[in-house]
Image (spheres, helix red, strand yellow):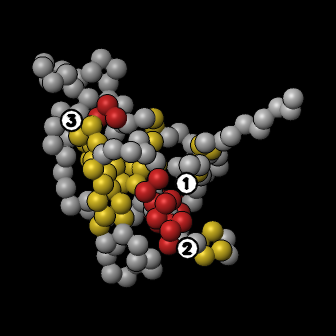
Amino acid sequence: MSELAKIVTFESSDDIPSQADLDWAFPKISSGMEPFGGRIIVQLRRIKKKTERIVLVQETKDNEKWNNMIGKVIAVGPLAYKNRDTMQSWPEGSWAQVGDYVRVPKWGGDRWEIKVPEGDRDDDPVLFMTLNDHELIARVVANPLSFKAYV
């Protein structure tokens, strides 16, 4: 009996992305909202229209955009990481701060798009999501642009 190949479901690398690539993937743009209570707003990574010289079809781009699970924390509600009864911070502290790159659930959260301001070369909107503080999966410590999810 032959050994089955391992199915990779998530991969990343430790290389360091350029600041220009990070700025493109996570442009500085207002989400138009501030979180209430224990909620967090995350800006999801933008997806490129091309990979090297191949232009991706719209269906592929849409799949990648909505399956995207890497984001940047842009706002934290006033009750996030606090005991709702005592208002004391969690003993383990905050899991993520504004500016941290995080992995978010593939399903769930409230998602919306904001158009990129005039003058940007790429007209694709930026995707945001709001979720509860305890729903973050992990802090990203590797290159946030290198992660690829396989569905």
> Residue 127: horizontal and vertical position, in percent?
36, 60
Q: Residue at x 29, y 42 (%)?
A: 131
Q: Earlier in the sequence, mark 1 or mark 3?
A: 3
The amino acid beneath tag 1 is Leu
Residue 74 appears in the picture as rendered: no
Q: Earlier in the sequence, mark 2 or mark 3?
A: 3
> Residue 85: horizontal and vertical position, in percent?
12, 20
Q: Which residue is mark 3?
A: 38
Residue 44 appears in the picture as rendered: yes
The amino acid beneath tag 3 is Gly
Task: Estimate the spatial distance between the alpha carbons at disc 2 and disc 3, rounded to whole Å.
Answer: 38 Å
Q: Which residue is mark 1?
A: 145
- The quadrant of the rendering that contains the N terminus is top right
Task: Estimate the spatial distance between the alpha carbons at disc 1 and disc 2, rounded to whole Å.
Answer: 20 Å
Estimate how packed mark 2 is, as few (under 14), some (14 to 19) or many (20 or more) residues with alpha carbons within 10 Å.
few
Compare residues 25 and 69 and report the one nearer the observer: 69
> Residue 36: horizontal and vertical position, in percent?
15, 43
Q: Is residue 121 left or right of residue 79?
A: right
What is the secondary structure assignment of the residue under circle 3? loop
Q: Is residue 59 left or right of residue 7?
A: left
Compare residues 124 and 31 and report the one nearer the observer: 124
Task: Estimate the spatial distance between the alpha carbons at disc 1 and disc 3, rounded to whole Å.
Answer: 27 Å
